[in-house]
Amino acid sequence: MAKLTIRDIAALAGLSKSTVSLVLNNSPRVDPATRRHVLAVIRRHNYVPSFAATALAKGSTRLIGMIVPGLSWHMVASINLGVAAVTERTGFDIILYTATNDRDYYGPVIDRILTSSMSSGLLVVTDRQPLDPLVALHRDGMPVVLINTLGTPVDLPSVTADNYEGALAAVNYLLRLGHERIACVQGMMEFQCCQDRYLGYLTALREAGIQPDPELTKPGEFDPETSRARARELFALPKRQRPTAVFAHSDSTAYAVMKAAADAGLRIPEDVSIIGFDDIESAAQIHPPLTTIQQPFVEMGRRAAELLLAGIQAADASAADAVRAVTGGGANDHDAGAANSDGAARPVRLSLPTNLIARASCGPAPVTRERRARAQTTTTA
């Protein structure tokens, strides 16, 4: 189906094209009832106006919109530090929007950003919301960069951490400590980041000559109570089958595993070693301090801001023709963003390295009779 133009929206709304243009440009000349009617038609038909056109019509801004899942999310402050380190040198300011799982992106993007043309581009810390609206915005000329902590594959520029290599490093560290019965408490496996972490876990074991035991993989869903319950199942196994180490897909999952270990009367790390993923601020402060894989959140914010500013420069340079589509400049009444999506280069996707942060929650594997016997046999041989 052909993409809707401003002329189509005007026909569907039963209004003139100039009236719709005034709504898109947030003009005070439009009465509130007409404005609500036009915005309702826009939402109903998933129309995304040309960002480049509306921005030029009102004059370029020095503002960047940033959508985050919630201000309380552990990585948001660190990501903001990285973004600010770049934007403060360039004269751009940040407008912060929150979009929780019960709100889609259309509210903050169309109502607050597009219709006011306040932002020159968008940085988005992804959560479990659909990304199609952001892809449509980007194709229509609005620079959008994902800080993609979930690793979701999408046709947008993005910056993420290397989840596979991070998991590989975590399990290899446990192997070097002598652990062989290494369990995995997963996150939400529909996310690419968790799939990559699990693949890293499996690869490390297989490269060490250890066949992964399905009994040692438990779904945690990034839910503390679910993770704690699944970890209790691991620690309830007979001693010879029980894991001596657990790789958790997040630090919060690792905390739940630590509580389950305490429930079972196990000591950390004497009886079981636990390693997480993220390195949130509290990881160094709990008892014992958590060994974990550090995601480079500050660097992710910095690199994403650099990508976005480059995109804004490119959009500003190519926006002159697009303005006529929204402001009614005559000949170019066609979709102003179509040319941007035809033959466009593949979006930049950066995968940044992680770091192993060794702390007191991991230690040498407990010496079992089997391990002692194997060590004696090796020494004799």
Image (tube, grey):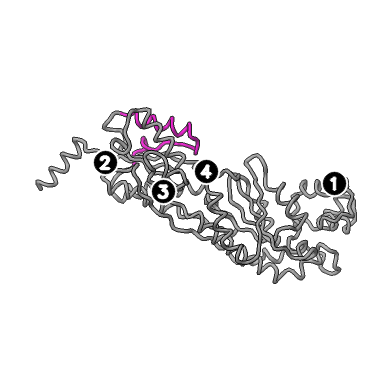
Left or right: 329 with respect to 281?
A: right
Give the mark nearest the N terminus, 2 or 4: 4
Mark 1 — residue?
37
Q: Residue 300: x, y in percent?
A: 52, 57
Task: Please give the name of the residue rendered at 32% of the width and 49% of the height, measured from the top-left corner.
Answer: 173
Cα–Cα span, label 2 and label 4: 32 Å
Residue that label 4 marks? 190
Horizontal relation, residue 111 to residue 299: left or right: right
Q: How far apart are marks 3 and 2 (CA)?
A: 23 Å
Q: Do the residues under discs 4 and 3 have CB atoms within 8 angstroms? A: no
Which label is found at residue 199? 3
Of the residues shown, which amino acid type is indicated by label 4? Glu
Which residue is at the front of the view, 242 or 12?
242
Dot in front, 3 or 2: 2
At horizontal 77% and vertical 70% (from top left) the residue drawn is 321
Q: Nearer the viewer, residue 109 or 330?
A: 109
Q: Distance between the residues labelled 1 and 2?
A: 66 Å
Mark 1 in CB contact with mark 2 (< 8 angstroms)? no
Q: Which of marks 2 and 4 is in front?
A: 2
- Graded by Cα atoms within 10 Å as few (under 14), some (14 to 19) or many (20 or more), the crowding at tag 2 reads many
Crowd around label 3: few <14 · some 14–19 · many ≥20 (10 Å): some
Q: Name the residue under label 2.
A: 365
Q: What residue type is labelled 2?
A: Ala
Give left or right: position of 339 versus 24.
left
Calculate the distance from the C-alpha at mark 4 to the C-alpha at mark 3. Answer: 13 Å
Q: Which of marks 1 and 4 is in front?
A: 1
- Does residue 316 show up magenta in the picture? no
Mark closer to the chain start, 4 or 3: 4
Q: Quadrant of residue 64?
A: bottom right
